[in-house]
Image (spheres, rainbow, N blue to C red):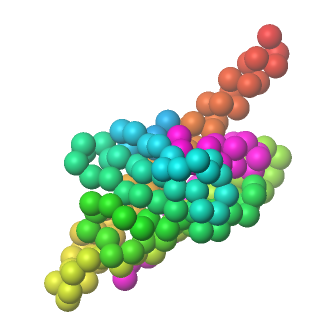
């Protein structure tokens, strides 16, 4: 099993960050690892919402389901299907207030790769660093997107 955590501070309120995360079907707007994303049902938010995320490589995808939704604070996502070599994976995103218009994002993932003993070694050597890199890009993309939205809102408010 592999596990890691990525933490980053954002210059935005938890409510601003949550509004982007809660737009569950549109993660491809800010996640640089993806070429497209879409909801896989009528439900647009909350526990049970599902989406498909198509990776930029044009070959791989994952399907994800929200298993925990603490409005404005925490989301847990089960990666339940896809072409990645994963037997199972759980991603958790927690938002913590970190001052006026500042949010600490704590994003973690635990995963079990497909395969036997050889795959376990490959997990530590190759897969865990690759997944952590992709997750870091996801959090960085969230930061850039949310902060750009905040700047746009500030400009509009002063105009």
Number of numbered tags placed on the structure image? 0
Could you tell whether 26 is left or right of 157 in the image?
left
Quadrant of the rendered image containing residue 67: bottom right
Q: In percent of the image, x 70 and y 32: which residue is there?
A: 150
Magenta range: 1-27
Q: In percent of the image, x 49 and y 68: which residue is there?
A: 78
| Up-down relation of residue 74 to residue 44 (above or below) | below
Q: Residue 128 in the image: x percent, y percent?
A: 33, 70
Residue lying furthest left: 118
- Residue 34 shows in the view: yes
Is 40 in front, or is 94? 40
Q: In percent of the image, x 28 and y 62: which residue is there?
A: 84
Asked if the magenta segment contains residue 45, the reply would be no
| Up-down relation of residue 158 to residue 135 (above or below) | above
Asked if the magenta segment contains residue 7, the reply would be yes
Quadrant of the rendered image containing residue 73: bottom right
Could you tell whether 101 is left or right of 51 in the image?
right
Residue lying furthest bottom: 117
Is 54 in front, or is 158? 54
Quadrant of the rendered image containing residue 71: bottom right
Q: In percent of the image, x 33 and y 47: which residue is there?
A: 55
Q: Residue 56 in the image: x percent, y percent?
A: 30, 42
Check the picture and name the quadrant holding the N terminus.
Answer: bottom left
- Residue 109 shows in the view: no
Residue lying furthest front: 42
Check the picture and name the quadrant holding the C terminus.
Answer: top right
Could you tell whether 22 is left or right of 114 in the image?
right
Q: Residue 72 in the image: x percent, y percent?
A: 75, 55
């Amino acid at each position: 099993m592999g596990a890691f955590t990525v933490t980053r501070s954002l210059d935005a309120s938890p409510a601003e960050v949550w509004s982007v995360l809660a737009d569950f079907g549109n993660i491809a707007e800010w996640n640089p690892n993806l070429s497209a994303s879409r909801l896989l049902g009528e439900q647009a938010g909350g526990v049970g919402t599902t989406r498909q995320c198509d990776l930029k490589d044009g070959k791989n995808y994952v399907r994800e389901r929200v298993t925990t939704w603490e409005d404005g604070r925490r989301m847990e996502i089960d990666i339940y299907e896809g072409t990645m070599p994963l037997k199972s994976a759980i991603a958790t995103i927690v938002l913590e207030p970190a001052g006026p218009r500042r949010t600490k994002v704590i994003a973690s993932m635990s995963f079990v790769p497909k395969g036997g003993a050889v795959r376990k070694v490959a997990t530590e050597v190759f897969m865990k660093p690759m997944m952590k890199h992709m997750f870091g890009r996801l959090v960085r993309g969230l930061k850039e997107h949310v902060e750009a939205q905040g700047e746009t809102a500030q400009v509009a408010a002063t105009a």
